[in-house]
Image (cartoon, rainbow, N blue to C red):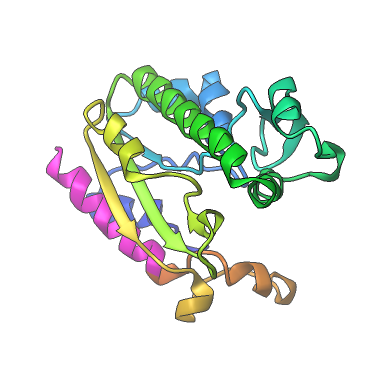
Amino acid sequence: MKTPFSDVSESLLKTPCVNLAAVNAGLDTFASDKVLMEVARGADLSVVQVLGAQNVSNRYYRVHPRRNDRFLQAQPALKTLFPEVDYTEFHFNKHLLTTLQALSEERFAEVRRHLQDTWVDRMAQVIATLEGRVVLLWVRYRLKGNSAFNHEPVLVENSMIQALQDRTKGVVEVDVAPAGLLDDFDGMTMGALDFPAAQHMLGPNEHARIGCALAEKLQSLR
């Protein structure tokens, strides 16, 4: 992306905005990186994007410490709850969870609740580390299908955001759509083989909308 939303906000605010995003990183990546958190603590204000609840290590499974979308290991609690599953077949968290849901909605509900509670706790830790000088950026969109895993950020519900809101400087909510649905590719940097993946990403126009909404909120806090 030539102009990600952080650059749009920087241009509008006339204030340096440091983008600390990382490919395939989830909440665990940022929460566990002491150097990165120290950089964020030095800012006047930090924008923390709401990321999916499936990509956090928890009592049921461990995720890769950097590429948090990768499944590493099932914990004993998950093996007890779903003893019929061969966990060596899984490499990604979303594949694991959709399989568990298909096997048993009732048992999966326990995993889901725990993931959501773990996510809230970890987000609260990040907000506390940043001393509450945080604006949450909740970018929401839906992929094809009605599964909970086709809504981004995955497994994040309004009640979870409300549980954190009073600890922050506010929340910016932006509903968007992937580039493939809007034909929003002009300005993307990609090769021919990248096009299928690009259809599921946010395009330049949506990045511009997010940057504008974020800049408006940040300007109000000055």
Residue drawn at (80%, 39%), measured in percent from left and top? 85
Q: Using the image as rendered, state which of residue 17 and residue 196 is in the foreground.
A: 196
**Main SS category, magenta section:** helix
Q: Quadrant of residue 124?
A: top left
- In the depicted structure, whether residue 202 falls above or below residue 112: below
218 in the magenta segment: yes
Q: Quadrant of residue 75?
A: top right
Residue drawn at (25%, 56%), measured in percent from left and top? 213
Residue 194: horizontal and vertical position, in percent? 69, 70
Residue 175: horizontal and vertical position, in percent? 34, 61
Residue 14: horizontal and vertical position, in percent? 25, 49
Relative side of 22 to 121, left or right:
right
Q: Quadrant of residue 79?
A: top right
Q: Which residues are magenta?
A: 206-222
Residue drawn at (65%, 48%), measured in percent from left and top? 94
Q: Using the image as rendered, state which of residue 95 and residue 16 is in the foreground.
A: 95
189 in the magenta segment: no
> Is residue 186 visible in the rendered structure shown here?
no
> Is residue 161 visible in the rendered structure shown here?
yes
Q: Residue furthest bottom?
A: 183
Count of all numbered marks drawn on residues in the image: 0
Residue 112: horizontal and vertical position, in percent? 53, 38
**Quadrant position of the C terminus in the picture:** top left
